[in-house]
Amino acid sequence: MMIQVFGVPIQALLGQLLIGLINGSFYAILSLGLAIIFGLLNIINFTHGAQYMLGAFAAWMSLTYLGVNYWVGLILAPLIVGAFGILMERLMLRRLYHLDHLYGLLLTFGLALVLEGVFRQLYGVSGLSYTIPQVFQGGVNLGFMFLPYYRAWVIVASLTVCFATWFVIERTKLGAYLRAATENPELLQAFGVNVPLMITLTFGYGVALAGFAGVLAAPIYQVTPVMGSNLIIVVFAVVVIGGMGSILGSIVTGVALGLIEGMTKVFYPEASGVVVFVIMALVLLLRPAGLFGREK
Amino acid sequence: MAKKRLLTAIVTGLALVMAVSVASAAGLSDDVLKVGVMTDMSGAYSDLCGPGSVVAAQMAIDDFGGKVLGKKIELVSVDHQNKPDIAANKAREWFDTEKVDVITDLPTSSAALAVMEVANQKNKITLISTGASTKITNDNCNATNVHWTYDTYALAVGTGKAVVANGGDTWFFITADYAFGHSLENDTAAVVKASGGKVVGDVKAPFPNTDFSSFLMQAQASGAKIIGLANAGADTINSIKQAKEFGITQNQTLAGLLIFITDINSLGLDTAQGMVLTTGFYWDRNDETRAWSKRFRERHKNMPTMGQAGVYSSLMHYFSAVEKAGTDEPAAVMAAMKSMPINDMFAKNGYIRDDGRMVHDMYLVQVKKPSESKGPWDYYKVLRTIPGDEAYMSLDNSTCKLVKK
């Protein structure tokens, strides 16, 4: 006799929750990168989705052209994408700091379109294959669902990286410097800390997180030029709900929204595309700073 | 003064004479025949039609000699991004300001339906090749449209019947949530039930979509023997890959209701082997298809899909009809198209019905095992030729108002 919740057997529900957790892990790591960049640097990085896509492509290219395996790709791709981010910051974004937020938004948005267009021209849109690494092939039958090993790895990897990042920022000296640089860069610089370098490296790290998410995604979602644009809008909504500057908020909200979206897919699938935005609208009406945010 | 008046009079007279003679000559409107390929250049369907369809159209123009009734044939193309509003607006612009005479390809049934409506209002012809919904020749049929390559009913009759006959009698559908998906699901469900099977459930997935894990799990929970994929292109590829990843293919069988050869190329024979599907064209079927496909491949990196072959075939027939009618005036051309059979690499003894349906044989094929394939694109074995009159819905059941019963 199966227990049913609102007409859905408990097995199916647990399975969907697990899927929601997997999606939530992606949201968490992507919104973490965005939150770092916005929270600490006040830059609205619309290129984040394209950088996620670059990470996936870097992994695919290094596999196809250089023959490196998934594990090397997992480290190499974020480094490449992070380096690209640093270049972006040094050459372009730096000139816009003294201007309104919106200019940064326009620049990053335009860059995203250019990147996507270039890759679409080169690689079409059907998607490139990236095989799941041998060690992760297959899965385990949990009774209520069959969990592919690779998807379990995604949850572990992203949540580990998320919490490690949160720990560094909130609990270590380096993180303290970072947070100080946001509050009062001139004062910190007076103490001898190289603030511009810190900003550049932080931006690079935020972008590298997107690249890392891209490598994680490559074996399970198609490696396509538009994979980022599909995701970026949802991720922005997640960051807004969590609170634009809050690191912990973005992680927790990312996972929670993944779970909520998963539930919606079971009970009312047609709404699964919009549920995140409905929640965002509600949060903005009731708590504009976001669930974990502080009013600046 | 008198001289100037005389000059003015002569010039006016000449102008009038020329105007009259241009108007009375039967011939091409605007002195050119302009073909518009409206397709998906960058989205979920771009590999199965897209740039390849433009190549096919150019081939048709070149093979016909580049001219008809002594005037040049021109080609324009556009990406409608699978959005009906963009498609309809572009169609209006093409007809009103760019003198386009015919629009072809039109993937994404919602866009195809929108454009054929606009074309009908402006009295222009549409030749739908990649668009699939049976609504095109039923509720939404009109006198200026031809539905060339296939439709969701033919797919249902081909694949649906074959799968049920093979023991697959309980079905769960994963459906792309728009006109095409609904049409394909409805037609296939009807065939399944008529063949003695049962539909145990369905779920509508957003279009386009990348992650099908949640929907596949619902399919798995339903316990159906067959999971019918009422979607196409990148959606189908993702569904199949993820089904394999989640171990669903161990206990259940996937039925890809609309599959193109480019999808098999993307998936690889390892994943796709054994799948049964219905197609309107296969490049390796006979010498004629091979010869034409070889020429196509010289211009485009992939082998032709049925949609692309359909663009070529429909345009060649259209050009012949314009020549026969002596004009590009739609009613005359449509009459000419219906009066001539279609005999080319695409169809043998094909004909166009009153509802706009081009009736031709379809083919039930199975994807080869990797060991059975002797080279790139050698993917299918043809199991059965489905005669046109069996593949397409009988006019007795048609809801098209043009059909006299």
Image (cartoon, coloured by chain):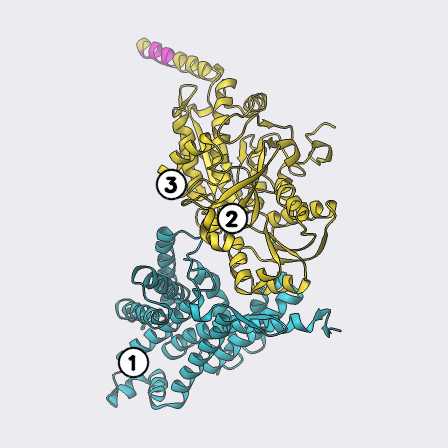
Chain colours: A cyan, B yellow
**Residue annotated with mark 2:** B82
Q: Secondary structure at mark 2?
A: loop
- Identify residue type, mark 2: Asn
Residue B209 inside the magenta-drawn segment: no
Asked whether the beta carbons under mark 2 and mark 3 sit within 8 Å of each other, the answer is: no
**Image height of A242 relative to B251, above or below:** below
Residue A160 location (% of width, % of height):
44, 81
* Front residue of B333 and B384: B384
The magenta segment is: B4-11
Answer left or right for B267 relative to A169.
Answer: right
- Identify residue type, mark 1: Met
Q: Secondary structure at mark 3?
A: loop
**Residue annotated with mark 3:** B300
* Front residue of A239 and B54: B54
Chain letter behind tag 3:
B
Q: Look at the magenta stretch and give its main secondary structure.
A: helix
Residue B247 circle label: none
Residue A24 location (% of width, % of height):
52, 73
Q: Residues within 10 Å of mark 3 (few under 14, many from 20)?
A: some
Q: Earlier in the sequence, mark 2 or mark 3?
A: 2
User: Which callout, 3 or 1, points to the residue nearer the camera?
Assistant: 3
